Image (spheres, grey):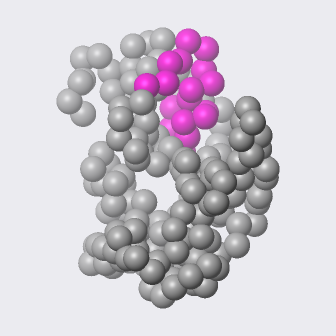
Amino acid sequence: MAGSRTVRGLARREFCLVLLRRMADLRPDLVAAALPRLGATRAEAHAAHTRWQALHHAPRAPRGLALRTAVLGPAPETEDRRFGDLDLEVRRWPLPLWPHLRWEVLSGPGGSVLHEHLVRAAGSPVPPAADGRLRVWEHVVADVSGLPGAVEVDPQVVTRWEVRLPSGATAAFVWGLLQQIRTRQDPGT
């Protein structure tokens, strides 16, 4: 497989199943409820994740942005962005499970993926985030990190992010989507 060819067995629906695999670490209840909305079983979710992982280790599989494009198709939203003296590309795709969000990939020279996560779609009906009024599985990192006094924290896990709020609570994200809000008295959840 090379270039812009499609990857057999994976498309946007299956890509959602891949994302759900890591979300199940924190919110197995929401993932279990999402599977029927995608018309999927746990076995199909597992198979999609296994296929995705195999592609990352297959020597002839597309890499970086080419792999995302092979699975998701051409990005309907594209943008060039300059960061210092580095030219970057931003690509966004709609996903069937989250119509108010987009999968965003930030890539560098040669199509290397520098960052990828769910972001808010333009015109989204989700109300603005506010400390004490956050919506799990609706708000994304940018919604919460922009709150006054919020501090982003990198937990050193590629799929996760955290934002500490002035109230003392911590908002936990997987692939950019809010999964849970932990209070100081509730460190283990």
Q: Give the answer, above or below, for where 118 lies relative to 96.
A: above
Residue drawn at x 40%, y 76% as measured from the top left: 59
Residue drawn at x 20%, y 30% as measured from the top left: 188
Compare residues 109 and 16 and report the one nearer the observer: 109
Q: Give the answer, above or below, for where 47 lies relative to 90.
A: below
Q: Position of residue 20 (x, y in %)?
A: 39, 60
Number of labels in the image equals: 0
Observer able to see residue 99: no
In the rendered image, residue 149 lying in the magenta stretch gets the answer yes
In the rendered image, residue 95 lying in the magenta stretch gets the answer no
Q: Position of residue 137 (x, y in %)?
A: 48, 47
Q: Quadrant of residue 56?
A: bottom left
Q: Is residue 175 left or right of residue 27?
A: right
Q: Position of residue 62 (x, y in %)?
A: 52, 74
The magenta stretch spans which residues?
134-153
Q: Is residue 28 left or right of residue 172?
A: left
Compare residues 114 and 176 and report the one nearer the observer: 114
Name the magenta segment's main secondary structure.
Answer: loop
Q: Is residue 89 left or right of residue 160?
A: right
Q: Quadrant of residue 186?
A: top left
Q: Position of residue 179 (x, y in %)?
A: 40, 42
Residue drawn at x 40%, y 45% as measured from the top left: 158
Observer able to see residue 84: yes
Residue furthest to the left: 188
Q: Quadrant of residue 182?
A: top left
Q: Quadrant of the C terminus?
A: top left
Residue drawn at x 32%, y 21% as measured from the top left: 183
